[in-house]
Image (spheres, coloured by chain):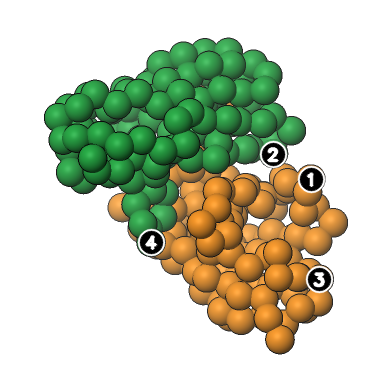
Chain colours: A green, B orange
Amino acid sequence: DIQMTQSPSSLSASVGDRVTITCRASQSTSTYLNWYQQKAGKAPKLLIYAASSLQSGVPSRFSGSGSGTEFTLIISNLQPEDFATYYCQQSYSTPFTFGPGSKVEIK
Amino acid sequence: QVQLQESGPGLVEPSQTLSLTCTVSGDSISNGGYYWSWIRQPAGKGLEWIGRVYPSGSTNYNSSLESRVSISIDTFKNQFSLKLSSVTAADTAVYYCARNEYRHSWNWFDPWGQGTLVIVSS
């Protein structure tokens, strides 16, 4: 199975900040990498698919990049509604696996 | 707009079988281009993909659960279901159903159901 790691596991940021979350895979996943946002008590929501494609309806302040084993999610101009936990997920091979999550908290 | 809704018992006794159903509305579950997946999340922990089913009935399972899991589809009812046998407290989690879109080998989960909490306890 492909193992996913994320850093940082949590961070504190202010509204308007630029936030960067990194996801690493235990082996190359090409660009088969997705990002999700999960708010407390809610289901995850797809933000980015295929490493860099923005899901319809997702604000353009979210962006994704990377390939192979290292990927980045950037939230530019952090908004109050962006405080949540973010998960990466590889779809290169089954079983599909998720990272442990990165929690973005209010500073 | 496609919506998914999980249903089933919220409490299951140890060693019994957990059974959940996901009802899809807003689109036919038979439409090509989508698998239908189950994913779970223990309280305060991360997400674990359980498996998926295609409208034809073909399935893929997480090897960690494969000996205990079965996912089936009912295209007439526009539903798909999860059965997990011989459950223990470690199977206590919020269970989500999700549409698994795939294009040119890329796969992603969208949308998700709201999730249903299943507690394994006597």
Helix, strand or loop at label 4? It is: loop
The answer to whether residue B87 is above or below residue B51 is below
Question: For the residues tagged 3 and 4, is the chain the same?
Answer: no
Write down the chain letter for disc 4: A
Residue A95 - label: 2
Question: For the residues tagged 2 and 3, is the chain the same?
Answer: no
Report whether residue B22 is seen: no
Question: Label 3: which residue?
Answer: B86
Quadrant in which the N terminus of chain A is drawn: top right
Q: Which of label 3 and label 4 is nearer to you?
A: 4
Question: For the residues tagged 2 and 4, is the chain the same?
Answer: yes
Residue A36 - label: none
Q: Which of label 2 and label 4 is nearer to you?
A: 4
Report whether residue A74 is seen: yes
The answer to whether residue B51 is above or below residue B26 is above
Q: Of the residues under marks 3 and 1, which one precedes in the sequence?
A: 1
What whole-number distance in Å separates the C-alpha atoms at marks 1 and 2?
A: 7 Å
Point out residue B69 in the picture as x, y percentages from the top left corner. Answer: 76, 60
Point out residue B85 in the picture as x, y percentages from the top left corner. Answer: 78, 69
Question: Label 4: which residue?
Answer: A41
What whole-number distance in Å separates the C-alpha atoms at marks 2 and 4?
A: 25 Å
Question: For the residues tagged 3 and 1, is the chain the same?
Answer: yes
Q: Of the residues under marks 2 and 4, which one precedes in the sequence?
A: 4
Q: Amino acid at mark 2?
A: Pro
Question: For the residues tagged 1 and 2, is the chain the same?
Answer: no
Q: Are marks 1 and 2 in contact (CB under 8 Å)?
A: yes
Q: Residue at x 55, y 53 (%)?
A: B45
Q: Are marks 2 and 3 in contact (CB under 8 Å)?
A: no
Question: For the residues tagged 1 and 4, is the chain the same?
Answer: no
The answer to whether residue B48 is above or below residue A49 is below
Left or right position of A74 against B31: left
